[in-house]
Image (cartoon, rainbow, N blue to C red):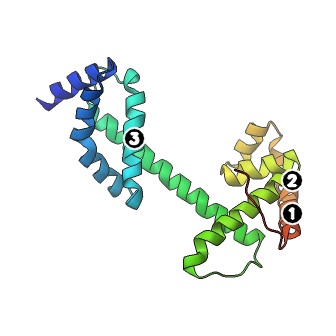
């Protein structure tokens, strides 16, 4: 019975019936939330589920008749949770790289850590923006986008062997730029 209800709700939602999609959301929110939590979304499970439902709604046109809605939706939830993990790794990786590039910044008590983290990120971005285009591009691809050397070479249209040497020089310039910022207050661009 549920399968038929899902098929009908999906068909009506495709035709613009918001109530039909709302019925699907009501039916599958709990299992979607549980899936996000089990796959490691933690406190951000609600955000993951909300994004998954938005993406599912946008993708209804590509939903194949005869497929089951529940597994299709849960696959989107799992993918969104993976995206969350990648985002977390990038944020923590950025913080780690900043700590390596600017090791003389003082250790901070945990309550102030978020404020300092934002200041460090703003300093890193300001220093990155001050670099020549090629340097900024190679650092961005390798560290901010987390691309491999081969992927970086492909994206930038450079020979593979050039990425490593250009990256090394760019990191040296970035470290110098960070040091030159010194005690100046860094204001992040909006």
Q: Secondary structure at mark 2?
A: loop
First in sequence, mark 2 or 3: give its number.
3
Q: Quadrant of residue 127?
A: bottom right
User: Which residue in the protein does label 1 denote?
Assistant: 177
Of residue 125 and residue 91, the one placed in the foreground of this image is 125
Judged left or right of residue 7, residue 119 is: right
> Callout 3: few (<14), some (14-19), or many (20+) C-alpha neighbours within 10 Å?
many
First in sequence, mark 1 or 2: give its number.
2
Against 7, residue 106 (above or below) is below
Q: Position of residue 133 (x, y in %)?
A: 86, 45
> Callout 1: few (<14), some (14-19), or many (20+) C-alpha neighbours within 10 Å?
some
Q: Position of residue 84 (x, y in %)?
A: 48, 52
On-image quarter of the N terminus = top left
User: Which residue in the protein does label 2 denote?
Assistant: 131
Against 141, residue 57 (above or below) is above
Of residue 12 and residue 18, the one placed in the foreground of this image is 18
Q: Secondary structure at mark 3?
A: helix
Marker disc for residue 52: 3
Measure the alpha-carbon separation of dots 2 and 3.
Answer: 37 Å
């Amino acid at each position: 019975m549920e399968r038929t209800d899902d098929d009908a709700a999906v068909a009506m939602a495709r035709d613009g019936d918001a109530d039909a999609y709302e019925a699907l959301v009501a039916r599958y929110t709990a299992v979607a939330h549980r899936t996000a939590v089990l796959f490691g979304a933690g406190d951000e499970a609600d955000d993951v589920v909300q994004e998954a439902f938005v993406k599912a709604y946008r993708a209804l046109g590509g939903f194949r008749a005869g497929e089951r809605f529940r597994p299709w939706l849960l696959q989107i939830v799992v993918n969104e949770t993976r995206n969350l993990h990648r985002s977390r790794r990038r944020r923590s990786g950025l913080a780690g790289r900043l700590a390596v590039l600017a090791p003389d910044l003082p250790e901070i008590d945990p309550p102030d850590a978020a404020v300092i983290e934002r200041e460090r990120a703003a300093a890193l971005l300001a220093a990155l923006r001050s670099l020549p285009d090629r340097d900024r591009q190679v650092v961005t691809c390798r560290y901010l986008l987390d691309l491999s050397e081969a992927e970086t070479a492909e994206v930038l249209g450079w020979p593979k062997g050039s990425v490593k040497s250009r990256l090394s020089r760019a990191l040296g310039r970035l470290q110098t730029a960070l040091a030159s910022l010194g005690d100046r207050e860094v204001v992040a661009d909006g």
